[in-house]
Image: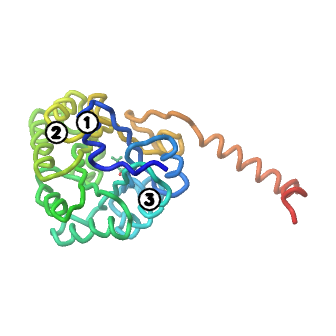
Amino acid sequence: MSRRKTILDLQEMKAKGERIAVLTAYDYSLARLVDRGGIDLVLVGDSVGSIVSGYDTTLPVTMEEMLYHARAVVRGTETPLVVVDLPFLSYQIDLRDARLNAGRLIKEGGGQAVKLEGGENVAETIRAIVDMDIPVMGHIGLTPQSVHRMGGYKVQGRQEEQARQLLADARAVEAAGAFALVLEGIPAALARQITAAAAIPTIGIGAGVHCDGQVLVLHDILGLCEKYSPKFVKRYVDVSGTIVAGIEEYVREVKEGKFPGDEHSF
Ligand code: KIV
């Protein structure tokens, strides 16, 4: 059995120039496969709201939902570091809430770190959680919990002023004690600049190849989510067709009285 990775392993990977591979997972069965695939870090993202629960945004996701999915993913993995998202409204109101909810994701969810969205505006919150010895991953750029402020899921940092703000956000998140930083939906050149300036690993999604690592939603790379496919997603396999074919065959055999056969009967 291999030992679970820690935030120190990720920092060492950045120092050595070794790329970090990250995927989301939300349940036990797929988390086991993600672990077998050799992933470094598993993110129990609040994207679970759109992918698994069918919400239009991540905003309705609750702490109880995150705890449920975190426990399943932790049970299904041995090697990768498990980072759990703090959902909308679990850390924005005050520091007490933020500390309590981060603590719950570790104590009740079993994760080894938490992630939250924002830059300079959440630096104090990151500091408060890190002060409890809970590792925090930052997340700047296209932050889905801010969908209504952004007016949709739009690439951020294209204008000079926005880019300057994102550089300041990255600095603030690192200074507050975050161990890593997700860069989502920003120009590749800006992600390169942030990555070069940061001592902590950057993990990109729709942020080009120059980040220290990459993250994608598991269901997107497997072709399991047919809802939409953003430009930054690469579909490595398409299992939807295989699943539907299997289901169709089952339905046919049930209707025709071919299943169960003698070998499946007592
Ligand atoms: O919720 C999520 O899955 C995420 C990643 C895609 C970065 O935040």
Residue corresponding to mark 3? 74
Residue type for callout 2: Ala
Q: Is residue 136 left or right of residue 81?
A: left
Of the pair 63 and 255, the residue shown nearer to us: 63
Kind of element beneath mark 2: loop
Are dots 1 and 3 in contact, CB under 8 Å? no
Of callouts 1 and 2, which one flags the residue occurring earlier in the amino acid sequence?
Answer: 1
> CB of mark 1 within 8 Å of CB of mark 2?
yes
Residue 93: x and y, percent? 18, 68
Q: Which of the 4 image quadrants contains residue 49? A: bottom left
Q: Is residue 207 left or right of 224 when viewed as pictured? A: left
Residue that numbered label 1 is attached to: 14
**Amino acid under label 1?**
Lys
At mark 1, the secondary structure is helix
What residue did someone put label 2 on? 199
Which color scheme is applied? Answer: rainbow
Report if the CB atoms under discs 3 and 2 are less than 8 Å apart.
no
